[in-house]
């Protein structure tokens, strides 16, 4: 979903490009960290904790990057650690 007017998107893009590569990278890392923290709070509110919490974080973070079989193997490794 994108409800941003093209003119505003261009202005925001220009502001981002005024920053150094390091600053842009730090912004991305901070956004990822914040999103991860929100996800963990949500999962804990649903009752997940310990190893099951770690598995759910892995699945929610990487479900579009790995096959279900690979994710399952990764979760099995978490359970063994």
Image (spheres, grey):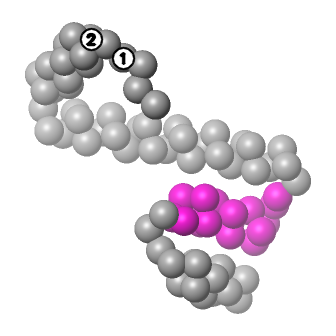
Quarter of the view holding residue 68: bottom right
* Camera sees residue 26: yes
**Percent position of residue 43, x then y:** 76, 50
Label 2, secondary structure: give it.
Answer: helix
**Percent position of residue 10, x then y:** 19, 18
* Residue found at x 64% / y 39%: 38
* Residue found at x 74% / y 62%: 53
Q: Which residue is labeled 1 in the image?
A: 4
**Percent position of residue 25, x then y:** 25, 42
* Residue found at x 18% / y 39%: 22
**Percent position of residue 73, x then y:** 60, 87
Q: Nearer the viewer, residue 15 or 69?
A: 69
Local crowd at mark 2 within 10 Å, few (<14), some, or many (≥20)? few
Q: Main secondary structure of the magenta part?
A: helix
Q: Nearer the viewer, residue 55 or 66?
A: 66
Q: Is residue 7 above or below residue 71?
A: above
Q: Is residue 54 above or below residue 13?
A: below
Dots 1, 2 in contact, CB < 8 A: yes
Local crowd at mark 1 within 10 Å, few (<14), some, or many (≥20)? few
Specify the label residue 8 is tagged with.
2
Residue 57 sits inside the magenta stretch: yes
Q: Which residues are magenta?
A: 48-63
* Residue found at x 63% / y 82%: 72
The answer to whether 41 appears left or right of 61 in the picture is right
The answer to whether 46 appears left or right of 1 in the picture is right
Label 1, secondary structure: give it.
Answer: loop
Quarter of the view holding residue 26: top left
């Amino acid at each position: 979903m994108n409800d941003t007017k093209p003119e505003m998107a261009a202005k925001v893009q220009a502001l981002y490009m005024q920053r150094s590569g390091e600053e842009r990278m730090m912004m991305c890392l901070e956004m990822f960290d914040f999103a991860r923290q929100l996800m963990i709070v949500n999962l804990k509110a649903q009752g997940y904790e310990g190893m099951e919490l770690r598995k759910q974080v892995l699945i929610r973070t990487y479900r579009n990057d790995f096959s279900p079989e690979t994710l399952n193997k990764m979760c099995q490794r978490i359970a063994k650690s």
